[in-house]
Image (cartoon, grey):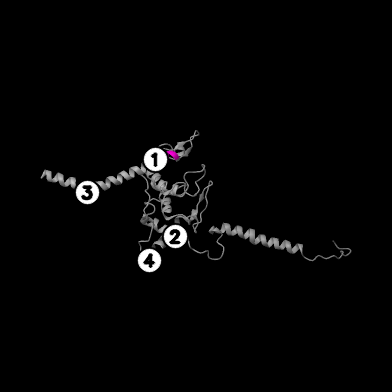
Amino acid sequence: MLMLGLVMTGSLYAAFAPAQAESAESDTELIAEGRELFLISCVFCHGQNGEGVLTEGGTQYGPSLAGVGAAAADFQLGTGRMPLVQPGAQGAAKAPVFNEDEIAALSAYVGSLGPGPAIPDEGDYSIESLDDEEREEAISRGGQIFLTNCTACHNFSGNGGAMPRGGQAPSILNTSPEHIYEAMLTGPGNMDVFSNGNLTPEEKRDVIAYIETMRDQPEYGGFGLGGLGPVSEGLFGWLVGIGGLVGFAIWIAAHSTRTTKAPMKGTDA
């Protein structure tokens, strides 16, 4: 009986263990590849082990990456914000420096530095699996959440706007659903962190579904002026509207008919 138990245990282990071992080995190789890329491209700001770098004055030159999670690295690298061209108020989105495989490796390495948000799967931010009625409900819920929590910075149209201390809320209309989800999870720059305790995964998915509908929304009423509301509309009114009226009034005064008669005696000129 003892021999039979050992044989059965060994057989079961041989059947299931190879896949697990292969997966672990694959993750280890990916992390090792990411470590090599990190040592070449990231240590100047973040330190050899992602511990961060302090300047001589004691200010943070590059933050610690322990615990930020793979999602934060995937967002920063995938949107081109990292590596920074130069330190500033915030990193600007640009074309990614690394390809997809390199970003996956670097994200895996950063994720190994400490527990943090993982890169989301497509099912986390897509409503393709829902039927038409459920999609409409998800978009409606997402719109309510977006108008309540996001318009103060990103504008009701998603075009973004200026922030204090040189910051800027970027436009989210050209941001991929994956990166929007990661931004809500990690709170890059001045953005708040919307963890699963603040917004459930389903609510994040609904917000992204609503943003997707904003991409093709037409500009009703003529020029959208960036969708920035009364600021751009008021500026347009003053410069173009009132400025045009003032210019037209000056033109009328310059081309009006003037009298050539001499003033009558006893009257002012």
Whether residue 23 is visible here, answered yes or no, is yes
Which mark identifies residue 35?
Answer: 1
Say whether disc 1 or disc 4 marks the residue closer to the N-terminus: 1
Bin the neighbour count of mark 4 within 10 Å (Cα to Cα): few under 14, some 14-19, many 20 and up.
few
Residue 24 x/y as whole percent: 30, 44
Residue placed under numbered mark 2 in the picture: 212
Magenta range? 33-40
Q: Main secondary structure of the magenta part?
A: helix
Say whether disc 2 or disc 1 marks the residue closer to the N-terminus: 1
Q: CA distance from mark 1 to mark 4?
A: 45 Å
* 37 within the magenta span: yes
Q: CA distance from mark 3 to mark 2?
A: 44 Å
Q: Is residue 197 left or right of residue 249?
A: left
Residue 51 x/y as whole percent: 41, 37
Q: Secondary structure at mark 1?
A: helix
Q: Amino acid at mark 1?
A: Arg
Whether residue 113 is visible here, answered yes or no, is no
Q: Is residue 257 above or below residue 121?
A: below
Say whether disc 4 or disc 2 marks the residue closer to the N-terminus: 4
Residue at 22 percent of width and 48 percent of height? 15
Residue placed under numbered mark 3 in the picture: 15
Say whether disc 3 or disc 4 marks the residue closer to the N-terminus: 3
Q: Amino acid at mark 4?
A: Asp
Q: Secondary structure at mark 3?
A: helix
Residue at 42 percent of width and 57 percent of height? 208
Q: Nearer the viewer, mark 3 or mark 2?
A: 3
Q: Amino acid at mark 2?
A: Glu
Q: Nearer the viewer, mark 2 or mark 1?
A: 1
Q: Secondary structure at mark 4?
A: helix
Residue at 29 percent of width and 46 percent of height? 22
Residue 237 x/y as whole percent: 62, 60
Which mark identifies residue 236?
Answer: none
